[in-house]
Structures are given as structure tokens and as C-alpha cells.
Image: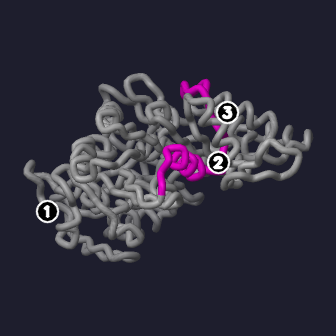
Amino acid sequence: MFSQREQFKPFESRIWLSSPTMHGPELEYVKEAYETNWMSTVGANINEAERLACEKIGCKYAVALSAGTAALHMAVKLAGVKPGDRVFCSDMTFDATVNPVVYEGGIPVFIDTEYDTWNMDPAALEKAFELYPNVKVVVTAHLYGTPGKIDEIRSICARHGALLIEDAAESLGATYKGRQTGTFGDVSAISFNGNKIITGSSGGMLLTDDKEEAEKVRKWSTQARENAPWYQHEELGYNYRMSNVIAGIVRGQFGFLEEHIAQKKAIYERYRDGLKDLPVKMNPFDAENSEPNFWLSCLLIEEEAMCRQVRGECDVLYKPEPGKSCPTEILETLAQYNAEGRPIWKPMHMQPIYRMNGFVTREGSGRAKTNAYIAGGVKGTDGRPLDVGMNIFQRGLCLPSDNKMTVEQQDTVIEIIKRCFD
């Protein structure tokens, strides 16, 4: 690591990974909710936010909920997952993709990642159906705003009679073959969490083309009240509906989605160009078929350029080496200069809570070799690491990607990263 005395002063204001960007109309819609006293789970903001989502994404129905996680939970419930049912899930993702399966008593089986988009590997999914032929639900996520190989995944699901739940929480505004993510699943979910491409500070939506499914979710998300003059309940309900106040922020943000995407894309391209001489790669995407929303710009260090790094459950050690670096060194150095980055999502099959669950690679079950895995240590028949998600986690990191970061600030971040390889 290099000396701070020889380099840059810390940024006066923190450079965030990805923070909310407000524009003005959001406050007007929140004020409207306040002045009209529609502060709860009905109101014009909710109706308009749902309409805008349908218009932008191209689905028939959107149900505004308290979080993307709530939307995924309702999707799992709609899919009919019962206690003991196995469900195939993306492995390298945030646990909100997976936890709703467990809410309904299901058992997640994790499908390994592919290098082309860092999303669910269709070859591993096909192998999983050979191992677990009775599975009828698949949950796939689009990581960091990059569409996965969704046509292949849909085709595999169709051949095996499985429903597809699409977690588009990170990919709002991204397209695959000209079609918006959030329209490929039998049911899909998006998120308006505080760090997403547009935000409501919280909130999410379930997306569907089925009117009956949308009506079910609206009922379930308001405690499953029956149409009676008193509080009548015949099935389990949830307090999941979005408030009209939050919906006002979402409503105001939708008009700036394309602007945010353009800003995020510019950040990605500046990193790509500025770091091109280093032994690193940016998070990949299929340029021929997809256009990400570039929510987060990520870096993958070449294996031969990795200094030694060992991670425990909650801590990490590394040994600096000339000409090499690792995610921990880069992240710690950025933090010294008041810039926020993060590790890549730790794969679900590595998480203590899910360590006993099934895990399938493109060559079959990965669990037999779990204890032997180190980055690059176990190879498949193609000579590449067998556990792709673990390998990306070991070598990857998320860079500061805030769309309020100036070009000059990003140039400084790029120089800091370069010096980590000195």
C-alpha cells in the first residue's frame, strides 16, 4: 500500500457507493399526500406510481408494496411454494432474493454463476433439473443491473414445467433484446430501496400480466381482509402495501430513470477506460443482446494479479505484494480517502445460514468439494474454476458508483486504485 502523505487528501464529502438523488417533484407529491391527508396505503400517488411502472416496464399490472423483498415473498406465495418444496435460486445475490422462499417453508437450492454476466448459469440450472427433477419454481436475479441469460433460463423452465420468478430489484430500466427486465418472469419484482437506480427511500412492486394474481397480492398485502362490513379474515395476510407518502417519492423519481441510467453508464465507461492498463476487468454484459442500467460498476482482478488474501466469516487478512492487489486492499485504501466501495455479494451457498442447502455447478453438485474450494483451486473440465460465484467473490469488488460523483472525483478514485497495484 502507498503512503497517504505522497498522494491525495481525503475527499471532503464522502463518495458513496450509490445514494439517493432527489430532483424536486418528489417533494411536491409527498406534500400533496400530506395536504390531502392521504397518508396511508391508498391514494393518488400509489395509483400513479403503479401506472408509471406498467408504462415503463411493459407489464399489465403493478402492485406497490413496502419493499422488493415483500414483492418477492408475494411472488413465492403466488407460485404455490409449500413447506419442504425445493426451489432453485440464484447463488450470487443479496439474501433478499432467497429469504422469501424460506418464509413459505421452501428449501432453496443454489445455482452457480456464469462469467459472461455474473448471473445464474443456464448450464448449471439444466444440471440442477437432472438432480432435482420435481422442482417447479426458479428464482433468478439480474445482478448489479445486468440482465442474465434470461431467454435460456426461460426455455429451461418451460421444458421442465417450472414457474420463473424474476428478481429485477437491481435492474429497473435494463433491457434484454429490447425488452425491459421485469417482464420475463411469470411474476417479477422490482425495488425502490434507498440505493437503487430510482428510489422511494424504500418500497417495491410486484409485476404481472395476470389480473387475478394482482388482485390476490393487493388483498394479501393489506392483511387479507374480506369484503365484509367488519374485519373478516379467511386466510393469512401481511402488512405489505406501500404508503401513499413513499409512493409520492417513487412517482416523482420515475421521470428521472433514464437520466440516472445515463449517468451510471458514464461512470462505468470512465472506470473501464481509466483502468484499462491494469490487470482487471469490469463487470461484464452481453453487449449484443442487453443494455444494463449500470447500477453499480464492479471490478474483477485477474487471478495472477491477486495478492494473498484470506477471508474468515467476518474478517479478512491480506499480504501486500508489488504489482498485485486484492479487493480488501483496494476497499481499505478507498475508505482511507473517504470513498465507499463494497465486496461483491458473498454467494448464498457460502452463507452460514444456507451452508447445508444444495448447490449445483455446471458439472453437477458442488457440495462434495465445498471444503476444498479456494479461488481458482478446483477446476472444471474447461479448466476454469468450478465454483464460479466463489471465484468472483474472491476477486471482485463494487466501486464507488454514485451519480453525484464528479468526473474529477472519479479520476481521483481511479488513481487511488492504480496506486494499489504499484
Q: Give the secondary structure at mark 1.
A: loop
Q: Earlier in the sequence, mark 3 or mark 1?
A: 3
Residue 286, by quadrant, is: top left
- Horizontal relation, residue 365 to residue 206: left or right: left
Taking the magenta stretch, the answer to whether it contains residue 81 is yes
Query: Residue 23: image x %, image y %?
Result: 70, 38
Give the magenta-colored segment's residue range. Answer: 54-82
Taking the view exactly as shown, the residue that stands out farthest to the front is 234
Residue 393, by quadrant, is: bottom left
Residue drawn at (33%, 76%), measured in percent from left and top? 312
Dot 1 crowding, Cα within 10 Å, few <14, some 14–19, many 20+: some
Query: Residue 378: image x %, image y %?
Result: 13, 62
Residue type for callout 2: Gly
Query: Residue 419: image x %, image y %?
Result: 31, 59
Real-space Cα distance between discs 3 and 2?
12 Å
Tell me the residue that label 2 is attached to: 203
Q: Give the secondary structure at mark 3.
A: helix
Tell me the residue that label 1 is attached to: 378
- Horizontal relation, residue 276 to residue 78: left or right: left
Residue type for callout 3: Glu
Real-space Cα distance between discs 3 and 1?
47 Å
Q: Nearer the viewer, residue 237 or 239?
A: 237
- Disc 3 versus disc 1: nearer the observer: 3
Tell me the residue that label 3 is attached to: 50
The correct choice, above or below, for 191 with respect to 98 in the image is above
Dot 3 crowding, Cα within 10 Å, few <14, some 14–19, many 20+: many
